[in-house]
């Protein structure tokens, strides 16, 4: 298996183009199952999760073609021959359960494994099932498989106990072909939700309120094909912002604006990191020592949980005491132990992490325990004295396209090596 070898790299400088958002592309690809007509999805990064989703769609009977050079995917689900997926095909990726809504809308049935993904906490689907039940769907769970079926999907008011992104997306996709009006209250408002709604509207769906906590969907009889470009990845952008900050460099992010990054920009400003919108892109730079801050992850528009680990790396070198409180996933501090191996001073108390800034980190052999934890380790390795070996990098490559190549373009000393 491959690993990353990272040397202390000094200030990163230059420009980097931000890829399309994996977390926007995955539900949009699932939504292609809603129509018999062809769909073309642009700006899709060639990541392992994306390949897993295309394989899942093929398993249901869709014709899928992925031009990785152009980063475009064409999908035609003219005939859906299968409504079920095996654990091997779907169980290791959380987003696989997003096929439930489209399958119920098209076939009135679905059979999917419980969702997997990174070990950062439970991935309950109770909110998905509660919403589906209100819309007339029955369900049964046996041996890790969720079976769903209905006679006719009908629009209903649905209140989510928590603004779950996945539940909001699944219910939106089921509701677009349901009879009547569905109103999702306490809905997630993430930019990825808005991107999915934009795609569904291009297909002919009647959706209003996306980007707020109340989304209204009026069911239509059928949807058409559409062409759509996926929004840029705000988490990849935030990670490169943190890379510029932790190395004291100056990096220009191409292809993304301030609107998607307001919570991250605000916290970086508290840390003494400057962000400026220019004609070339967002320019991020730091010229003085990092200041400590307190961070609390929240649903959008709060600070994103996916930026918690990269920010922890940043704060290990701040002058003073910082605190991070994680409110979204209960097991998302696993990376703290790996950062401690590099000399970080971190204490975990339930869902809070107390970080005492140190003068320097040192290279060590560490392991990427999940996607964002792996990105955090790369950031720390860039600033650490000596050499760092990061294993299990397949986690990182689930969500970052060519992260090592992009970092090398900015002057980072990072390379791949086969694990011994």
Image (cartoon, rainbow, N blue to C red):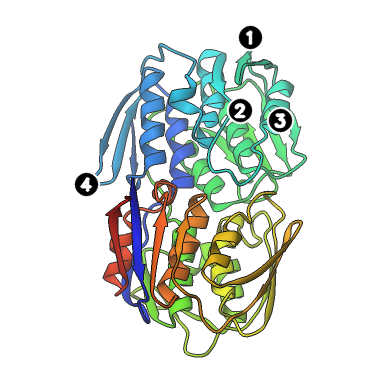
Which of disc 3 and disc 4 is earlier in sequence? Answer: 4
Image point 40% across, 81% down: which residue?
249
Q: Measuring from the top left, give residue 45's x and y in whole percent.
A: 34, 48
Where is mark 4, residue-wise? 69
Mark whose residue sits in front, 3 or 1: 3
Give me the residue at 55% from left, 24% from top. Answer: 100
Instruction: Please tell me which residue is depicted at 37% across the width and 14% down the height of the picture.
Output: 79
Are circles 3 and 2 on residues that touch, CB within 8 Å? Answer: no
Question: Along the horizontal axis of the image, is 373 left or right of 215?
Answer: left
Distance from disc 4 to disc 1, alpha carbons, whole Å, reads 42 Å
| Dot 4 or dot 1, earlier in sequence | 4
Residue 326 versus residue 223: which sits nearer the camera? 326
| Image mark for residue 175 | 2
Q: Can you identify the residue that label 1 sits on?
A: 151
- Residue pushed farthest front? 420
Disc 3 and disc 1: Cα gap in Å?
A: 21 Å
Distance from disc 4 to disc 2, alpha carbons, whole Å, reads 34 Å
Crowd rating for badge 1 (residues with CA inside 10 Å; few <14, some 14–19, many 20+):
few
- Distance (Cα) linking label 3 and label 2: 17 Å
How much space separates mark 2 and mark 1, taking CA atoms? 14 Å
Give the residue at mark 3: 126
């Amino acid at each position: 298996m491959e690993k990353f070898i990272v040397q202390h790299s000094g200030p990163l400088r230059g420009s980097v183009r931000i890829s399309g958002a994996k977390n926007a592309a995955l539900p949009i690809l699932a939504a292609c199952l809603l129509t018999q007509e062809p769909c073309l999805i642009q700006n899709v990064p060639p990541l392992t999760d994306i390949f897993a989703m295309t394989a899942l769609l093929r398993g249901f009977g869709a014709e899928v073609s992925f031009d990785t050079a152009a980063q475009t995917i064409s999908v035609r689900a003219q005939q859906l021959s299968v409504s079920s997926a095996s654990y091997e095909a779907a169980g290791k990726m959380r987003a696989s359960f997003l096929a439930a809504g489209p399958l119920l809308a098209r076939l009135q049935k679905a059979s999917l494994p419980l969702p997997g993904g990174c070990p950062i906490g439970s991935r309950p689907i109770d909110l998905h099932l509660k919403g589906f039940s209100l819309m007339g769907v029955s369900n049964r769970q046996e041996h890790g498989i969720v079976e769903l079926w209905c006679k006719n999907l009908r629009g209903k008011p649905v209140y989510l106990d928590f603004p779950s992104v996945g539940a909001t997306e699944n219910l939106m996709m089921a509701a677009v072909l349901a009879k009547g009006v569905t109103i999702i209250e306490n809905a997630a408002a993430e930019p990825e939700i808005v991107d999915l709604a934009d795609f569904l509207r291009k297909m002919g769906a009647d959706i209003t309120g996306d980007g707020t906590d109340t989304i209204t969907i009026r069911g239509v009889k059928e949807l058409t094909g559409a062409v759509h470009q996926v929004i840029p990845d705000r988490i990849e952008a935030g990670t490169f912002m943190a890379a510029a900050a932790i190395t004291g460099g100056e990096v220009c992010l191409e292809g993304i604006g301030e609107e998607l990054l307001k919570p991250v920009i605000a916290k970086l400003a508290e840390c003494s990191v400057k962000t400026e919108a220019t004609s070339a892109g967002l320019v991020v730079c730091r010229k003085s020592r990092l200041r400590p801050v307190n961070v609390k992850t929240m649903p959008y528009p709060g600070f994103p949980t996916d930026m918690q680990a990269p920010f922890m790396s940043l704060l290990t070198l701040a002058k003073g005491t910082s605190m991070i409180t994680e409110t979204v996933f209960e097991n998302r501090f696993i990376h703290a132990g790996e950062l401690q191996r590099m000399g970080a001073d971190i204490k975990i108390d339930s869902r809070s992490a107390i970080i005492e800034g140190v003068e320097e980190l040192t290279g060590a052999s560490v392991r990427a325990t999940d996607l964002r934890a792996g990105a955090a380790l790369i950031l720390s390795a860039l600033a650490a004295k000596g050499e760092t070996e990061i294993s299990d990098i397949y986690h990182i490559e689930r969500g970052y396209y060519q992260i090592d190549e992009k970092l090398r373009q900015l002057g980072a000393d990072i390379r791949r090596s086969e694990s011994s």
